[in-house]
Amino acid sequence: MDIRDAAAVRNLVRQVRPDAVIHTAAGRDNWRAMADGAAHVAAAAADQGSRLVHVSSDAVFSGREIDYDEAAPPDPVYRYGAAKAAAETAVAAVDPTAAVVRTSLILGHGRGQHEILTRDLIAGRVQGALFTDMIRKPIHVNDLADALLELAASSYGGVLNVAGPDVISRYDLGVLVARRMGLNPARIPAATIAESGLRIAADVRLNTEKAVSILATRLRGVQESVSSD
């Protein structure tokens, strides 16, 4: 199903009649998939009375404030973040009772984008570098999935930050991942965002105090999740 097609989304949800919908679909460079698609899913779920959990991103922030709680307004600095912010706005307008989960870098089982990029950089399959000044709070995919399922069975409405507790740069995270995979971390190219010329947020830290207080799911730190993966 193409979530850009409002009729297709509506028809499928009518056929399935789900108790809950967890929206993780996206197209990183496709505004219609990220923003319009989110609106279509929210409208279809609301039409059927289905519980909605929408997955958003820390990309909605510029990094100017560094620490962000659930009340922080989005201030994206690049297209992907703007599309995710637009999706949040659409979901909240259609269904204020939906849970909007802002998360960070997602790791797990060697299949996360960061893990794949780390392997490819070490092997020389791609050009680029891991940024030493790009700071995030990564989460293991299992923990995120458990949190989303928990929220789907709850009545929580509004934004909730769901990320790991550990603050780490993308470069240092790559070093941890490489060591876990038995690869040589010295082969990872390092750079800064300023050197790259890219317009992306540097230091974005999602405050997860609220999530820790209401979720039974334990959000593990990156050191623990990488070593136990």
Image: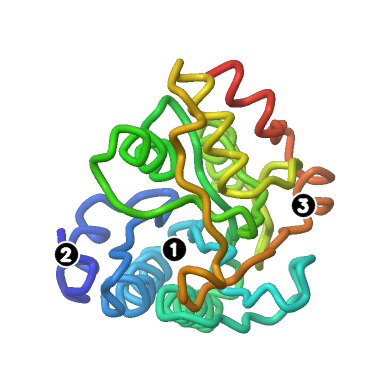
Q: Answer whether labels 1 and 3 touch (C-beta < 8 Å).
A: no
Tag 2, which secondary structure? loop
Q: Name the residue under label 2.
A: 2
Quadrant location, the N terminus:
bottom left
Q: Nearer the viewer, mark 3 or mark 2?
A: 3
Residue nearest the viewer, comparing 60 with 22: 60
Residue type of the residue flagged with mark 3: Thr
- Name the spot of residue 92 as percent of width and height, x first: 55, 77
Q: Which residue is drawn at 57% across and 45% down?
A: 171
Label of residue 221 in the image: none
Residue nearest the viewer, comparing 15 with 52: 52
Q: Answer whether labels 1 and 2 touch (C-beta < 8 Å).
A: no
Tag 1, which secondary structure? loop
Q: Residue at x 68, y 64 (%)?
A: 204
Q: For this view, does 207 lie left or right of residue 1?
A: right
Residue 79 falls in which quadrant of the image? bottom left
Q: Can residue 94 be spotted in the picture?
A: no
Q: For this view, does 69 lie left or right of residue 164?
A: right
Q: Mark 3 points at which residue?
A: 208
Q: Mark 1 points at which residue?
A: 49
Instruction: Report the Cα–Cα distance between label 1 and label 3.
Output: 29 Å
Instruction: Report the Cα–Cα distance between label 3 and label 2.
Output: 33 Å
Q: Which residue is drawn at 51% across and 29% down?
A: 185
